[in-house]
Image (cartoon, helix red, strand yellow):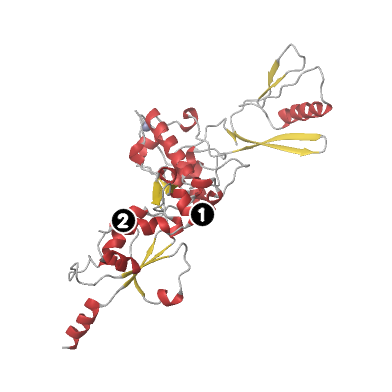
Amino acid sequence: MSLKRVQQWATFARVWHIYDAAWQNPFDSAKLLRKHLMGMHKPIYHPLNDCGDHVIVINSKYIALPGDEWKKRVYFHHTGYPGGASWTLAWELHTKDPTMILKKAVYNSMAGNLQRRYTMERLHLFPDTEVPENLLKNVSNQLEQLRPKPKRLDHYDENYVKEFPKLIDLPKDYVLR
Amino acid sequence: MPGVIRMCASGVNPKFHIILQNALEVGVIHGFGSFKVNVLSDGIRTFSVTANLRIKEIITIEDGNHIRITANISESDRKPYLVKNENDRACPLCASGLHVKHTDVLILSQFVRSDGCMLPRRITGLCSKQQRIVSSLVTMAQKSGLMPNLNPANSNRDPQKRYKWEKFNKYFDESTIKWK
Ligand SMILES: [Zn+2]
C-alpha cells in the first residue's frame, strides 16, 4: 500500500537535472532541454498537466557552433521606435551574455503559448561551473551530452602522445623543425 | 635538406665570417651534408662532406658575436610505435582502415610539423585522396583550437584569447570535405 503512495509522490515530484553544455550545439541541446523542462519524457505528460522538471545548465559559455556560425548567425531586435532595429552577430551576443544564445535557443524551440514563460522559469543557466549550493543540492540526474567533448592535444599526457601508435615514420633525411 | 649559407664578398659583415667558419667546422665534425657558400659575388661553390641519411635537429646558439650551428643526428623516436603497413599497395592511412575525425588529434598530429603546418605528400606518403582529407582535418582541428601546442612560436597559443569570433568553441562536419 505504502509503495503506491510513494510512487504517486515520485510521479508528480519535480526532478532536477544537470546538463554540461561544454562543446554542445545549443540548438540540438535545446530540443533535449525542452523535453525535460516540459515533462514530455514522462508517461503522464499532457499540455495542461504541469509536470515539467528543472534543468541546471552549466558551462553555457563553452557551447560550440558548427563551422563559421559564430560570425554568420544574426540575432534581430527591434526597440519598437522608428530606426530601432538592430542586428547582433552570435559572437557579439555571446560576448555580452554567455547564457543568452542557449536561452533563446530553448525559448524558440517551444510553442508560443501561455505555458512557455513558466517553463522557462525552470531552466537555470550558468556560464561556468559555479552553481549556487542551494540549487546544486536538488540535483538527482545528469543528462547525457549529445556530442563527445574533444580533448586537446596539450591536455594529453606527454608520454601517452609519444607512445600512441604511429601511422607514418619521418623519412631518413628529414630535418626536424 | 642540407644547410645552405649564402654570402656576398662585397660589404662582408665580420659576423658572417664567424658563421662561415663555424659552419665549416661543424660540417666536418657533425657530418653535415653539403654547403652552398657564395664566397665570391659571381660564383657558387658546392661541396659535400658526408651522406645525409639521418633525422637531424639543427640547433643555433648565438652568444655575442659568435653563432654556432650544430646538428643533432638521431634515430626517429616513432620507430618502436610504428604500425606496420601489411598492404603493399595502399597508403598507411588507407591500409589502417580508420575513419579519422577532426577531433582525433593524436592521429592528426603525426602529419604535422611543430609549427602546425601539414607535411607535404612526399614526407607523409599518403595517397592524394587521404592527403587532401587529412590536410582539411588538420585545418579543422587547428580552427577548433585542439592542437594549440602545434603552432608557430610567436603565435597566441591559448584558443580562448583569439580574435573576436575565433575564441569560441566550434566544431566541423567531416562530410563537407571535398576530396575529388
Ligand atoms: Zn590511400
The answer for which chain carries disc 2 is A
Q: As displayed, is residue B51 above or below residue B177?
A: above
Q: Indicate which label's residue lies in the foreground, 1 or 2.
A: 2
Residue at horizontal 41%, vertical 74%?
Answer: A135
Residue at horizontal 17%, vertical 71%?
Answer: A44
Number of dots carrying numbers: 2
Query: Residues under labels 1 and 2: Cα distance?
Result: 36 Å
Quadrant containing the N terminus of chain A in the rendered view: bottom left
- Say which amino acid is labelled 2: Asn
* Residue A106 location (% of width, % of height): 33, 59
Of the numbered discs in the image, which one, if any, rests on residue A108? 2
Q: Quadrant of residue A16?
A: bottom left
Of the numbered discs in the image, which one, if any, rests on residue A155? 1
SS of the residue under disc 2:
helix
Q: As displayed, is residue A96 above or below residue B87?
A: below
Q: As displayed, is residue A154 above or below residue A134?
A: above
* Residue B111 location (% of width, % of height): 48, 38
Residue A110 located left or right of residue B77: left
Residue B66 located left or right of residue A98: right
Residue B97 in view: no
* Residue B33 location (% of width, % of height): 65, 26
Of the numbered discs in the image, which one, if any, rests on residue A39? none
Outermost residue, bottom direction? Answer: A1
Mark 1 neighbour class, 10 Å CA radius: few under 14, some 14 to 19, many 20 or more: few
Depth order, front residue of B54/A103: A103
* Residue B149 location (% of width, % of height): 55, 47
SS of the residue under disc 1:
helix
- Say which amino acid is labelled 1: His
